[in-house]
Amino acid sequence: MAKDSKRLLSRRDPLRLVGVLLALAPTAALAQAGAYPSKPVKLVIPYPPGGGTDISGRAMAHRLSELLGQSVVIENKPGATGMIGAASVAKSAPDGYTVLFGAASEMAINACLFKNMTYDPRTDFEPVSLIATFPLVFVAPATTQQSLRELIEMARAKPDTISYGSIGSGSPQHLAAELLSSMAQAKFLHIPYKGSGPLVQDAVGGHVNMAVSSVPPAVPLVRSGKLRALAVTSSVRSEALPDVPTMAELGFAGYEFNTWVGVAVPKGTPKEIVDRLRQGLVGALAASEVQSTLRDQGAVPVGSTAEQFRQFVSDEVAKSDRIVSQAGIQPE
């Protein structure tokens, strides 16, 4: 308590005492929020252990626990393309102790695909911070010679004859290809796979004309000469693939489609708690070991304000909705 408040209270004036207590009520509320966290924080990752979102979340959690002064416990809750874990957070108490480390699918794309979701990513969360974006990469078998431009021309001439693989219908990889299809006015044949491993291996084997992959599984195959990288989906070149052009460089101005990860808490979580959590996240994101882990995953570390992340999610939902509607994408 401030010195002036102590002097006021020491006068033992009942009316003055009531006035001081009323004046201090907001301060007490802030102090209670300022005590956050007073127990371990649960970081829900809606995917299995070992994937890019999980690796990124664990890197953040270790440093975040040091900055918050409390343990940050990882809880993997996979299923339904991230919706099971995201829904569990949306329905949790808004006290800052159950936190979503989410990705593009459950926080934006699924809202455009599924009509009976048990949560709305636009209204059921308090955004905290965008953590990182992940460019995707279009790759082709090393045994072929066509450029992306040539593959597009072939698809224009003979629709549905040039195939591409993704990790599933409605996945970010699928939407990235459909965005290109729309902008290039070319109709490709989509072949969905169950995961990045089978996808890139079939691309190496020449079973598809091209594939849309996350960066990490593609990089070693590109560097070893087993795959050719055609273009990245980000607005700037990827640090992991600096010689690979962007779509804009190939003539598709305005093309950008990244996957991403960010942190959100249940709707109604006090702003003071959101701010404290964001402060810890931004501090963790600045740590060299966290930056290194994220960049190893092909990520671009970002960090943002809560309002910037809110607008980002809204924009991503709108972009995904346009692509899904134009392409007539249906969930698997």
Image: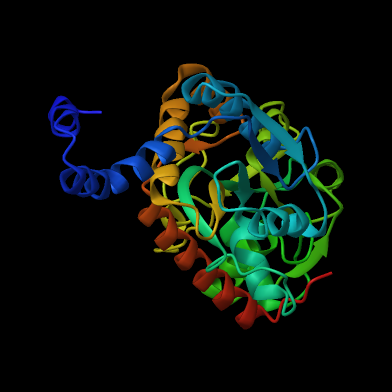
* Above or below 190: residue 328: below
Q: Quadrant of residue 273?
A: top left
Give the number of callouts.
Answer: 0
Residue at coordinates 62% horizontally, 49% vertically from top-left? 102
Q: From the viewer's side, name the closer residue of 118 and 129.
A: 118
Q: From the viewer's side, name the closer residue of 34 and 29.
A: 29
Q: Is residue 166 visible?
A: no
Q: From the viewer's side, name the closer residue of 228 and 96.
A: 96
* Above or below 256: residue 153: below
Q: Position of residue 263 (x, y in %)?
A: 54, 46
* Above or below 55: residue 149: below
Q: From the viewer's side, name the closer residue of 135 and 68.
A: 68
The type of colouring in the image is rainbow
Q: Position of residue 313 (x, y in %)?
A: 49, 61
Residue at coordinates 58% horizontally, 75% vertically from top-left? 321
* Above or below 71: residue 123: below
Q: The C terminus appears in which quarter of the rendering?
A: bottom right
Q: Position of residue 258 (x, y in %)?
A: 54, 52
Q: Quadrant of residue 114?
A: bottom right
Q: The N terminus appears in which quarter of the rendering?
A: top left
In the image: residue 241, left or right of residue 48: left
In the image: residue 124, left or right of residue 17: right
Residue at coordinates 72% horizontally, 39% vertically from top-left? 227
Q: Is residue 282 visible?
A: yes
Q: Position of residue 45 (x, y in %)?
A: 70, 42
In the image: residue 118, left or right of residue 230: right
Residue at coordinates 47% horizontally, 46% vertically from top-left? 130
